[in-house]
């Protein structure tokens, strides 16, 4: 069943239930009013009955109704003898039960009841009249029953008509309500078929469907950026890979003619090939690192950030023995993927070492999830600052140094996937200071 059909059925059912309940309510209200009028007339009529004693026993008198009003049927009830004293021209007597005699004896309150007398549906009021006596006043319900019967037929017809009308209106309402959904569906199909992520869906309006279209446009924008980033990564990687591959191929071709080369020339070619292989390996590893994207939530764990940074500093000392490190490591715990955080911190330390001269100082500090790495090198040119974290971007002063231009891009990606941020500034005295800010776990700080 389609969503439109379900919406039509639900809306039609809701309207149908409302119509049926309204019809039942109207019928019950009219029935209550009509029978209430009969009960009121019976009370008024019974109040006019007067008990009289004659030589032949007890009798009652009751005035004739004015203006041709309905006289009703009146009968006297004795607590010991039952019904007595019907009118002389009466052909029937009203049924008398123990309840009626109890009212005559003063043992029960007045009450109404329905009965059938000679096939006629009547309403009977039994009312206390005098000690030992009660009076019964009855009126036929023929007109009331006939009116209610006609009303019932009318309500049933209205209910059926209401259900049919509700179905038609429900279908129309469903079509109108789902028109934006249909447009949204057509737009998504068009985007899926053309693969044009630059298209957007009309999100004008203030209703929930407009919000849905706006959210979908936001998703399309994010997806477009992601695809563009992937394409850019592939294009940049292919461009960066071309140079070491070309150089490596040249050296391999030279090695094919190793017999023609002098021993020292052959050694230089081999050294160049090994160096280019190492450069290529590093570049491929960096590209793979950037292509990883977000990490699954199950890989996240509590990480002792100060201990992780301390290990990275020790590795930095081994790789750059001419650099002196000054560390201030306060206890700090963050939530993240240890391998990724280690890679980001190592990249910052390697970058600081690369720009530090022999005997230079690299300052490393950890506090409340904030990792700070400062070098005292030449600093960063103003025109390079906006792009320092872009993939494959290398400042003009760094193009003669080893590296692929991906190290700081990896740091930014790790920071973003961990809900943090990385920034750079040029402090007084020269050099560059990088801040990797992560969110410490709740309840833990440097003073804990």
Image: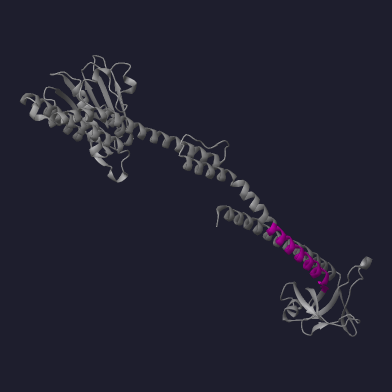
Please identify the residue farthest to the left as the structure is shown.
Answer: 263
Q: Residue 216, percent across and down?
A: 48, 39
Q: Residue 100, percent across and down?
A: 75, 78
Q: Quadrant of residue 142?
A: bottom right
Q: Is residue 359 magenta?
A: no
Q: Residue 390, percent across and down?
A: 32, 26
Quarter of the image where the N terminus is located: bottom right
Observer-nearest of 259 and 366: 259
Q: Quadrant of residue 420?
A: top left
Observer-nearest of 231 and 61: 231
Q: Is residue 160 magenta?
A: yes
- Dominant secondary structure (helix, strand or loop) of the stretch shown in magenta: helix
Residue 239 in sight in this render: yes
**Is 255 positioned to the left or the right of 70 in the image?**
left
**Is 133 positioned to the left or the right of 334 in the image?**
right
**Is 132 positioned to the left or the right of 61 in the image?**
left
Tell me which residue sits at (28%, 39%) in the image: 335
Q: Quadrant of residue 245?
A: top left
Tell me which residue sits at (42%, 35%) in the image: 224
Q: Residue 283, percent across and down?
A: 23, 32
The residue segment tinted magenta is 138-164
Tell me which residue sits at (33%, 23%) in the image: 387
Quarter of the image where the C terminus is located: top left
């Amino acid at each position: 069943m389609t969503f439109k059909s379900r919406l039509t059925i639900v809306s039609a059912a809701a309207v149908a239930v409302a119509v049926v309940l309204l019809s039942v309510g109207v019928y019950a209200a009219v029935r209550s009013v009509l029978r209430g009028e009969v009960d009121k007339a019976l009370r008024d009529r019974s109040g006019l009955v007067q008990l009289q004693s004659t030589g032949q026993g007890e009798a009652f008198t009751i005035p004739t109704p004015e203006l041709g009003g309905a006289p009703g049927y009146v009968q006297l009830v004795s607590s010991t003898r039952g019904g007595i004293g019907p009118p002389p021209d009466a052909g029937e007597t009203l049924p008398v039960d123990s309840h009626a005699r109890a009212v005559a004896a003063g043992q029960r309150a007045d009450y109404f009841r329905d009965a059938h007398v000679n096939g006629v549906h009547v309403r009977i009021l039994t009312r206390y009249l005098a000690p030992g006596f009660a009076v019964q006043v009855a009126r036929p319900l023929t007109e009331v029953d006939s009116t209610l019967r006609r009303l019932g037929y009318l309500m049933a017809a209205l209910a059926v008509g209401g259900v049919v009308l509700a179905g038609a209106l429900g279908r129309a309402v469903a079509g109108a309500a789902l028109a934006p959904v249909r447009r949204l569906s057509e737009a998504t199909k068009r985007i899926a078929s053309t693969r044009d992520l630059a298209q957007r869906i009309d999100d004008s309006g203030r209703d929930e469907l407009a919000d849905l279209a706006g959210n979908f446009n936001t998703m399309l924008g994010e997806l477009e950026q992601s695809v563009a980033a992937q394409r850019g990564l592939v294009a940049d990687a292919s461009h960066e890979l071309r140079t070491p591959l070309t150089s490596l191929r040249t050296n391999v071709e030279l090695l094919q003619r190793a017999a023609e080369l002098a021993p020292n020339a052959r050694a230089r070619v081999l050294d160049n090939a090994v160096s280019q292989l190492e450069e290529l390996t590093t570049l491929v590893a960096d590209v793979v690192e950037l292509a990883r994207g977000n990490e699954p939530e199950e890989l996240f764990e509590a990480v002792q950030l100060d201990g992780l940074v301390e290990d990275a500093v020790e590795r930095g000392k081994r790789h750059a023995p001419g650099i002196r490190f000054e560390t201030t490591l306060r206890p700090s715990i963050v939530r993240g993927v240890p391998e990724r955080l280690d890679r980001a911190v190592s990249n910052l330390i390697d970058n600081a070492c690369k720009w530090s001269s022999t005997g230079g100082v690299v300052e490393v500090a950890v506090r409340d999830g904030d990792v700070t790495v400062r070098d005292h090198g030449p600093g960063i040119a103003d025109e390079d600052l906006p792009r320092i974290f872009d993939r494959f971007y290398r400042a003009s002063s760094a193009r003669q140094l080893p590296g692929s231009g991906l190290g700081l891009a990896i740091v930014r990606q790790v920071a973003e996937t961990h809900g943090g941020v990385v920034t750079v500034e040029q402090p007084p005295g020269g050099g560059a200071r990088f801040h990797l800010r992560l969110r410490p776990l709740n309840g833990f700080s440097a003073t804990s």
